[in-house]
Amino acid sequence: MKHIVFLLAVTGVLSVSCKTKKSATIIEETVQSAPPTTRQQLSDRKWKLIKMGHHESLRYDIFINFSDSSFGGKAVCNSYGGKLEFRKLSTIRLTGLFSTEMACDGLETEQEFFSTLQHIQYFNINGDTLWLSRPEPIPPLVFINVH
């Protein structure tokens, strides 16, 4: 009887182990980089922020650029940057945000931008317009291509 219980326990562990390994493989296959054309659309351009949150028009210029593994630009007062990770189609993660520490009149706008940027999960490009958003019902950051 002990042997039967032991065999059932081992079989259950192996079954869970195989399922976990299979699930990890499926997740790994699903979480692939964005197709090159999408990356290229994002990376080969300079983007200017035109809408943030409930601000229909911005008083200050804010720009962002992307490469294969990083992002950066010029905000109201400071230059900034960080790491870019493509997860799956139209899904990104921006981490390690850093910036210079100059003070100026538009610092509140810049801080709001940085705060929003750290929570971005999705991007969408339609022509010369880029939307960066997150899952909550918060308005996206909207940019236009200027280069």
Image (cartoon, grey):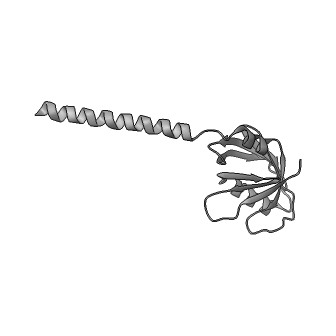
Please indicate whether residue 57 sits to the left or right of residue 8 in the image: right
- Of all residues, the one furthest to the right in this rendering is 147
Q: Residue at x 31, y 33 (%)?
A: 14
Residue 140: x and y, percent? 71, 60
Residue 6: x and y, percent? 19, 32
Q: Is residue 104 above or below residue 80?
A: below
**The quadrant where residue 57 appears:** bottom right
Q: Residue at x 73, y 61 (%)?
A: 112
Could you tell me if residue 66 is visible in this image? no
Q: Residue at x 20, y 31 (%)?
A: 7
Residue 26: x and y, percent? 49, 39
**The quadrant where residue 42 appears:** top right
- Nearer-the-camera pick, 62 or 125: 125
> In which quadrant of the rendered image does the N terminus lie?
top left
Q: Residue at x 78, y 63 (%)?
A: 108
- Nearer-the-camera pick, 39 or 46: 39
Please indicate whether residue 72 sits to the left or right of residue 86 in the image: right
Residue 32: x and y, percent? 60, 39
Could you tell me if residue 87 is visible in this image? yes
Q: Is residue 56 above or below residue 2?
A: below
